[in-house]
Image (tube, rainbow, N blue to C red):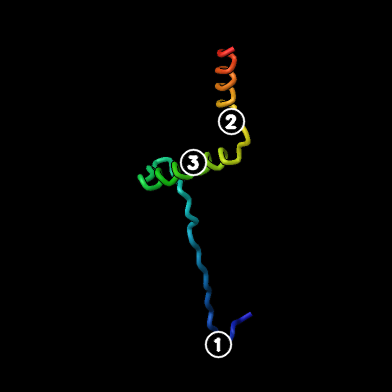
Amino acid sequence: MEPANNNWSIRYSWTQPYLPTNYNPFYTPSTEHVVTEEMIRIAAVDSIVDHMSTYPDADRIIKQIQESNK
């Protein structure tokens, strides 16, 4: 099958998805990426704490204090 006027063309594009990490074992992340990864971890921990209904460590400490005061 021949295209009209023998005019062949191909169009394509590709972009590298951004990841804050690199799979190259010799890659050393820049300081900006290290900070970004740490901020992601902090946000994740904040989210977990926000959704907690109890705080087991605090409950244990309060229980120990109450038992020692008896």
Identify the residue at horizontal 55%, vertical 21% (top origin). 61
Instruction: Look at discs 2 and 3 and give the one toward the viewer.
Output: 2
**Quarter holding the C terminus?**
top right
CA separation in Å, label 1 and label 3: 58 Å
Which residue is tagged 1? Answer: 5
Q: CA distance from mark 2 to mark 1?
A: 74 Å
> What is the spatial separation of the Cα atoms under label 2 and label 3, in whole angstroms?
20 Å
The label number, if any, that marks residue 22 in the structure image: none
Q: Nearer the viewer, residue 63 or 56?
A: 63
Residue at 56% x, 26% y: name it.
Answer: 57
Specify which label sits upstream in the sequence, 2 or 3.
3
Give neighbour class at mark 3: few <14, some 14-19, many 20+ (Cα, 10 Å). Answer: few
Q: How many marks?
A: 3
Q: Amino acid at mark 2?
A: Tyr
> Does residue 42 sit above or below 7 in this rendering?
above
Label disc, if present, on residue 55 of the rendered structure: 2
